[in-house]
Amino acid sequence: MTTNPLFPDVLQRARALLASGQRRILGIVASPGAGKSTLSERLAQALGEQVKIVPMDGFHLANSELQRLGRAGRKGAPDTFDVPGYVNLLRRLREQQPGETIYAPEFRRELEEGIAGAIAVDAATPLIITEGNYLLLESGGWHAARAMLDEVWFLDVDSQVRHQRLLERHMRFGRSREAALAWIETTDEPNAQRIERTRARADWVVQED
């Protein structure tokens, strides 16, 4: 397993996936606040139309369903996602036919809900990046997601930096400082510990400088 903080090396590895000439799906895993979306976007900016980002977060269960299930207080935990739906989308992306457009959901933080059909994936796009927390988890049906991915990278970030990013994010989207800190302690950090334990199953570790 290789650890390297340099973005050029990250870009080189992504280009190696493209070199096959076939559709490839890259998973990027990290704990909450580590910067999965930022890394994905940087790769997409560098590689242009060769890349489409399809985040796992679009498969959050709706808030109304989380309330019904009694899980609203720990939204973001592994069992608060439509795991079979996500796996099915990854399978469709692997088997996408020429001329076919596949639509994926997108999570909107300002709404705290997923929006169906928000991301259009063209069959000619050679690299799909899917980023999320649980791509390396082996329980709860998540192992089936890993089976759909060609590579999985684990993004490793200093825990204090990650914690500060989480705090700023929660406050930016409406939580008070006290409420944000409470959510981090009771929800984000238990999830982070679970995710960190999956690190050894990654194909590559990206160490943020």
Image (spheres, grey):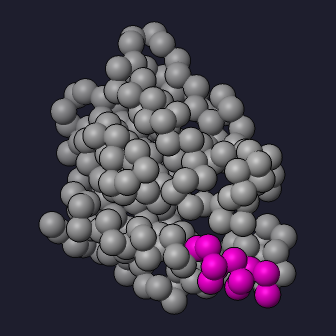
Residue at 78% over, 53% down = 67
Position of residue 100 in the picture relative to residue 63 (left or right): left
What residue is at 58 percent from the left and 73 percent from the top?
188
Residue 65 is one of the magenta-drawn residues: no
| Most common SS among magenta residues | helix
Based on the picture, tell me whether residue 184 belongs to the magenta stretch. yes
49 above or below 60?
Answer: above
**Is 156 placed above or below 177 here?**
above
Residue 97 rendering spot, x and y as whole percentages: 39, 13
Q: Measured from the top left, where is residue 142 in percent x and y?
A: 40, 48
Q: Quick check: 121 above or below 131?
A: above
User: Which of the pair 118/185 is nearer the observer?
Assistant: 185
In which quarter of the view is residue 175 placed?
Answer: bottom right
Picture quarter with the N terminus: bottom left
Residue 103, image x and y in percent?
Answer: 58, 26
* Residue 90 in sight from this viewpoint: yes
Locate residue 45, reporting x and y percent: 48, 49
Seen at 51% across and 27% down, the residue is: 121
Q: Is residue 36 left or right of residue 107?
A: left
The residue range painted magenta reads: 178-188
Kindly identify the residue that appears in the image at 48 percent across and 23 percent down: 122
Q: Quadrant of the C terminus?
A: bottom left
| Res. 49 visible in picture | no
Left-right relation of 191 to 105? left
